[in-house]
Image (spheres, rainbow, N blue to C red):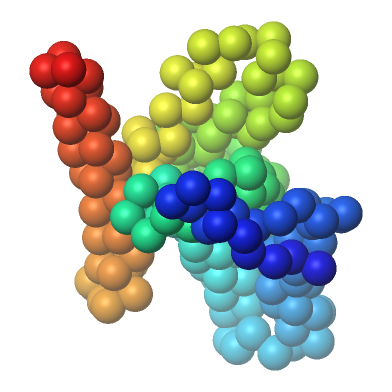
Amino acid sequence: MPRLVRQGRYLTVVPWRGERTAIMFVGLMPAAVYFWYGAHGQLGADPVNVFERWLGLWAVRFLLLGLFVTPLRVMVGSNLLRYRRTFGLLAFWYACMHVATYVVLDQRGDMGVLLQDITHRPFLMLGFAAFLLLLPLAVTSNDWSIRRLGRWWGRLHRFVYIIAVLVAVHFLMAFKTYNMTSISYAGALVLLVLWRGWHMWRRHTTMRMA
């Protein structure tokens, strides 16, 4: 079972067998629950829309968790870095299900209608752009890619901050009227991106002055 130990000034979770598999399993449970609700007619009058939005919301939640790992380590001293890729993969899988629901269930696979929708609705353009940028990050979220790409792996995965901004705007625009859910999640994404930019600038300035 997981436990915390102090290593220097950081609190680190001791690795345990099957931890990432367990996190993935638990992380995908909400999708299974919503699918069960949908199969039993418990998602209201517009089940496809509800299912699609909930999947998108969970994609945002796991994206936030992945982005929050570094600030948590810097400000609190809790080192959860090795779970960051797992959170990122969960965000990707929920994004895949979100997009698949839109393409297959909402648009019924009609490519003509789909292309018309994407090219004429800005929030869909942003959402698909974020999803396309997320693809190479998910494909390279493994130890082999880290060894193979070297320093380029870190540079590639910095695209997550661009993705976060695109997702924040997409999430806001997806609602016809602003509400606390859309504002709070989009605001949290933007704040984490701004924090990361400030932290990198501060670290670069400190290194130059040293």
Image location (x, y in percent) of residue 79: 52, 51
User: Which of the pair 138/170 is nearer the observer?
Assistant: 138
Quadrant holding the C terminus: top left
Residue shown at the point (76%, 52%) measured from the top left? 15
Which residue extends farthest front?
8
User: Which of the pair 18/186 is nearer the observer?
Assistant: 18
Asked whether residue 102 appears in the rendered view, the answer is no
Quadrant holding the N terminus: bottom right
Image location (x, y in percent) of residue 191: 24, 53
* Relative to 4, residue 158 above or below: above
Q: Is residue 99 left or right of residue 29?
A: left
* Relative to 41, residue 23 above or below: above
Residue shown at the point (55%, 49%) measured from the top left? 7
* Relative to 28, residue 104 above or below: above
Residue shown at the point (64%, 85%) measured from the top left? 43
* Relative to 148, residue 69 above or below: below
Please state the total of marks drawn on the protein image: 0
Residue 38 falls in which quadrant of the image? bottom right
Image location (x, y in percent) of residue 131: 52, 38
Q: Is residue 153 left or right of residue 75?
A: right
Residue shown at the point (60%, 25%) measured from the top left? 136
User: Which of the pair 58/45 is nearer the observer?
Assistant: 58
Q: Is residue 169 left or right of residue 94?
A: left
Asked whether residue 178 appears in the rendered view, the answer is yes
Image location (x, y in percent) of residue 10: 48, 52
